[in-house]
């Protein structure tokens, strides 16, 4: 019974931490909607699509990387990265770069590398802020969880790899949302911003999936189908 109670308590803590992480990210999304010059009639609809995409992304993260207690390293990195992302967006939007990027994306043909280049050129503060926020996870997790010193959540190279996946995800998300918007007739800045936020989350999902697969391959064959040790 005590063991069952500890499992239930851990499950409750994991559920609460996930809810807090999702809530924090959605609040940041709402703030970004106010900061960026959206101004199109489809903004509410794209906000709803983005919220659903973010929740599904967190569900995928929870399935691949269940929390034992508190927030997982990917959740913390997403929140800190989103804080830096929104702060950088504020700087870029003040210079008019967001509006320029929106017009370029409307005329873009959906090439991933071209979209990555345009994003970096027009929204440098946004991308640097997201990367800096993600890097802050390394000292934070080391100070909060001593065992992280021996695990991947405290390694700089792994953190940079996650940041790279999130940046690629932002570009891919923009392309996906703009293609969907072209099909539905609702292309505009709201679709672009929603794609970037959703892409950031799903970029993290892709990064965690790659690491999970890597650790699964490194396990002895007789342990591969019995569940491995997760990333933290």
Image (cartoon, grey):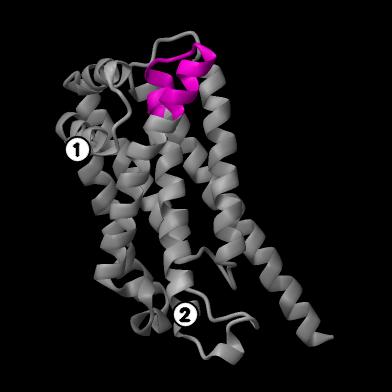
Residue at 56 percent across and 34 percent down: it is: 51
Magenta-colored stretch includes residue 188:
yes
Residue at figure coordinates x 27%, y 15% from the top left: 103
Farthest residue, direction right: 1
Where is residue 36 drawn, in percent x and y? 33, 22
Q: Residue at x 62, y 80 (%)?
A: 227
How would you rate the neighbour count of disc 2 (Cα within 10 Å): few for under 14, some for 14-19, many for 20 or more? few
Q: Position of residue 10 (x, y in %)?
A: 67, 72
Mark 1–mark 2 distance (CA, rounded to whole Å): 37 Å
Work out whether residue 143 or residue 42 is closer to the camera in this orientation and state it.
42
Question: Which region of the structure is painted magenta?
Answer: 177-193
Mark 2 lies on residue: 217
Does residue 35 sit above or below 60 in this rendering?
above
**Residue 76 screen position, x and y as percent:** 43, 58
Does residue 156 appear in the picture of this structure? yes
The mark found on residue 220 in the picture is none
Q: Helix, strand or loop at disc 2?
A: helix
Q: Which residue is mark 1?
A: 125
Task: From the top left corner, tell me how far across and down residue 58 is, in percent.
Answer: 56, 51
Is tag 1's residue or tag 2's residue first in the polypeptide sequence? 1
- Closest to the camera, between mark 1 and mark 2, is 2
Q: Nearer the viewer, residue 31 or 151?
A: 151
Side (left or right) of 59 relative to 5:
left
Q: Considering the image in quadrants, where does the N terminus appear?
A: bottom right
């Amino acid at each position: 019974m005590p063991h069952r109670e500890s499992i239930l308590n851990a499950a409750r803590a994991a559920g609460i931490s996930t809810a807090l992480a999702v809530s924090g990210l959605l609040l940041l999304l709402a703030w970004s909607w106010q900061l960026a010059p959206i101004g199109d009639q489809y903004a509410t609809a794209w906000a709803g699509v983005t919220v659903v995409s973010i929740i599904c992304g967190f569900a995928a993260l929870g399935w691949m990387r269940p929390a034992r207690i508190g927030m997982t390293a990917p959740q913390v990195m997403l929140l800190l990265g989103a804080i830096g992302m929104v702060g950088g967006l504020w700087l870029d939007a003040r210079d008019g770069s967001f509006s320029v990027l929106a017009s370029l994306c409307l005329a873009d043909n959906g090439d991933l590398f071209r979209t990555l280049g345009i994003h970096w050129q027009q929204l440098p503060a946004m991308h640097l802020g997201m990367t800096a926020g993600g890097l802050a996870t390394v000292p934070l997790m080391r100070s909060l969880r001593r065992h992280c010193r021996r695990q991947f959540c405290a390694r700089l190279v792994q953190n940079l790899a996650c940041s790279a996946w999130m940046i690629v995800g932002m570009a891919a998300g923009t392309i996906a949302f703009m293609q969907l918007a072209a099909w539905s007739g609702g292309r505009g800045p709201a679709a672009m911003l929603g794609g970037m936020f959703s892409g950031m989350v799903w970029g993290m999902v892709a990064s965690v999936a790659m690491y999970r697969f890597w650790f699964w391959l490194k396990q002895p064959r007789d342990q591969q189908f019995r569940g491995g040790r997760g990333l933290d």
